[in-house]
Amino acid sequence: MNYEQTFEEIYNDLQHVEESGHVADYITELAQVDPDQFGVHLTTVEQEEYSFGDAEKRFSVQSIAKVFSFVMAYSTIKSNIWERTNLEPAGTPFNSLLQLEHDRGIPRNPFINAGALVVCDILVSELASPKENMLAFIHRLSGNNRISFNPAVAHSEKKAGNRNYAMIYLMKSFGNIRNDIETVMDLYFHLCSIEMSCKELSRTFLFLANNGVIPWSGERILSPSRTKRTNALMQTCGFYDEAGQFTFKVGLPGKSGVGGGIVALHPEKYAIAVWSPRLNTKGNSHKGMLFLEEFTTKTRLSIF
Ligand code: GLU
């Protein structure tokens, strides 16, 4: 299939859609991003690659990185993650405190902020150098050791991090945070600050489309069963309180971030990353969602 032509057609169709939404502006680094950039990259499990637009330009992956922290804990850590976080869709915004009080400090899932904070706490308990180990893990998944944190973004996240601090203190009050709060927050803020391009993201997520094995190295990251479960979590919890819409319209497991990136994958077929910085009211890329909806409709390559 000539995906590049399909990308261009969809991109041109979307030029007629009225611009809506704004770039994330809670930190200056995100507020200053040119909102009209657009990139998409698809990598098949056979490692064919298809690109369009700003596919090699790096951006802040933000909550997409919550998949990396989760997979790292799920694949390497002995403790039972499911005693510390639930696995149900939240149905509330990513930084909501409402359910945490009700659920006695147990987050609804590992892909909302509270869940990612608990995963970071688990990683801090078990890793000698959590930030370095996290980056090394992403280098393994991506086959690219130039991927890194953006320290200025991590610093700004901390300055704007009041709600995240509120969540972690609330969870600590229920005994669901075991480590020093600043150490856990430092890992979390650095996780949010990772920068990658669409090309790098689609390659990095490819193991989840390939039964848990990195196609180019043959390295197994997750068992087939855990790969299935990770994809199921992305399907049900990957898009804040818009996971139902994304499933309904796009029909792929995936994860978004407030940097305007979305990664989605089709098991046994491909991983695709799209980037368009303007966000809809739920915090997902406005055009990114529309693009993927048209992509799976035109190609009939959704899982449903
Ligand atoms: N850095 C953001 C926060 O913790 C995460 C935003 C996102 O969902 O992408 O508030």
Image (tube, rainbow, N blue to C red):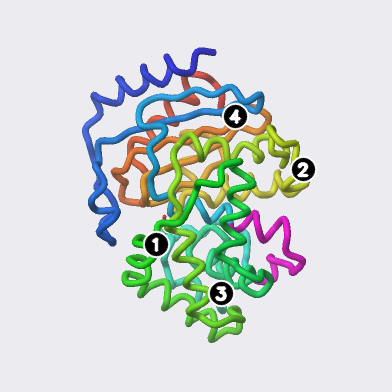
Residue at 56%, 68% (x, y): give it: 107
User: How far apart in space, not on screen, are marks 3 and 1 (Cα)?
Assistant: 33 Å
Mark positioned earlier in the residue sequence (2 or 4): 2
Q: Is residue 76 magenta?
A: yes
Residue type highlighted by circle 3: Asp
Query: x%, y% of residue 229?
Result: 69, 49
The C terminus, quarter of image? top right
The secondary structure making up most of the magenta span is helix
Residue at 36%, 49% (x, y): give it: 259
User: How far apart in space, not on screen, are marks 2 and 1 (Cα)?
Assistant: 35 Å
Q: Which residue is mark 3?
A: 103
Q: Which mark is in front, 1 or 4?
A: 1
Q: Which mark is in front, 3 or 2?
A: 2
User: How far apart in space, not on screen, are marks 3 and 2 (Cα)?
Assistant: 31 Å
Mark positioned earlier in the residue sequence (3 or 2): 3
Q: Which residue is mark 1?
A: 151
Residue type highlighted by circle 4: Tyr
What stretch of residues is rendered in magenta?
A: 69-84
Q: Which residue is mark 4?
A: 270
Query: Dot 2: within a 10 Å radius of its alpha carbon, few (fewer than 14), some, or many (20 or more) residues?
Result: some
Query: x%, y% of residue 69?
Result: 59, 58
User: How far apart in space, not on screen, are marks 3 and 4 (Cα)?
Assistant: 37 Å
